[in-house]
Image: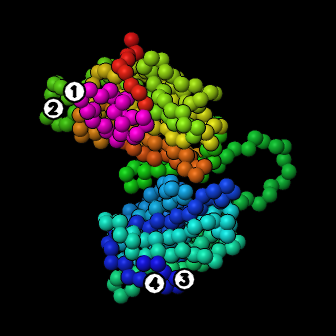
Amino acid sequence: MSLSKGANTPVASADVRVELGWRTGPGAPDVDASALLLTAGGRVRSDDDFVFYNQPVHPRGAVRHEGRRQDGTGVVETVRVTLSAVEPDIATVVLAASTDGTFGRVAGLYIRVLDAATGAEKARFDPVDATTETAFVLGELYRRNGAWKFRAVGQGYAAGLAGLATDFGITVDEPAAPAPVVPPAPAAPPVRLSKITLTKAAPSVSLTKQGATSGAMRVNLSWSARTPPRGWMNKGRDAVRLEDVDLDLSCLWELRNGASGIVHPINNQFGSFHQPPYVQLDQDDRTGGSESGENLTINLDHAAEIKRLLVFVAIYSGASSFAGLHGVATLYPPAGPPIEVLLDECTVPSPVAAIALIENVGGELIVRREARYILLPPGILKQQAVDLAYDWGLSWQPASKD
């Protein structure tokens, strides 16, 4: 149902997916979706009630920023709202957008509400009167007589996301006042000390928004043997001797010019940092016990040339599946906190696991958690199984490291 500005419609779904989309193109500014949970007084209870790219999941889990995807000639960001789980003292979920330019330069902007289970569109609003605004309240989900409704709002703000958030009671860090002139010191980027752990509920993070647009990003893999469940005698086919395990950190790569390939220790395909594919594997740690583990380094100076990178790990020897192993992959971007993906939920006989997909989406580099354990079809190599699962289209033949 397409709504005009100010119109509203009932939303009977218990769980909805709110999509904010726009068309990309030369000179088009970037757009970010956000949500604010308000009481009947029209204010947040605390800063926790603000859900956006740097705080993607509300503490109660009812509202989640699920990242973005490319959709034809445009980009779509998704906010998931489980209406049945929204706390009773929350009266309204405001759905907003902000941009690093002005909305008058954003083509094809829209917001729509979908039933999360069926995908059926419940409401849509296409604002058409944007000019110099840098933030917009596009719509709101609100309670009325015990039921939920959606209203098309279309209210613009000239002060960007900070101005919009402040109006609803969010505390926004202000730039520090100019200090007295002192001898210059090297400038340091802002750092959030907490580590980001990607989960099913919060599976993605933007490297670009963290300021990690150049320099070297290290991807580290370390692993250990999981403690067997009580009652195991630490024998048999499920037991793992860590000293026998050899895991191979690997990366399927695809550049925007169409070139593609793999970086892994087999046949010494260690890649290159300064030349395509701008990904390099530094060593093959065959025990997992070294302090530095295995590391891939990605050259973000060439981020614009990268289309997608899939970081994965394969068991070369010493174990039949990841069910007996606990792996941790950590990305260390040049700016912002480390990003961690845990590999500790394997319940199938899988010898290969996709860790993270790094994609260039409209010029923005997005890291998405995969933690996907892949089963081998008969006659298929481990690396080939990953290729087939993610449609890379490479040619394969058996090879070894020895």
Residue picked out by circle 1: 239
Residues at marks 2 and 1 touching, judged by CB atoms closer than 8 Å: yes
Residue picked out by circle 3: 5
Residues at marks 3 and 2 touching, judged by CB atoms closer than 8 Å: no
Image position, residue 355 (x, y; %): 41, 39
Q: In the image, 14: left or right of 251?
A: left
Looking at marks 1 and 3 on the same chain, the residue that comes earlier in the sequence is marked by 3
Element type where label 3 sits in the image: loop
Q: Taking the image as drawn, is residue 398 in sight?
A: yes
Amino acid type of the residue that numbered disc 4 sits on in the rendered structure: Asn
Image position, residue 297 (x, y; %): 55, 31
Q: Nearer the viewer, residue 35 or 72?
A: 72
Give the residue at the far top of this rendering: 402
In three-dimensional space, the C-alpha distance between marks 2 and 1, rounded to whole angstroms, equals 9 Å
Bounds of the magenta segment: 372-393
In three-dimensional space, the C-alpha distance between marks 3 and 2, rounded to whole angstroms, equals 63 Å
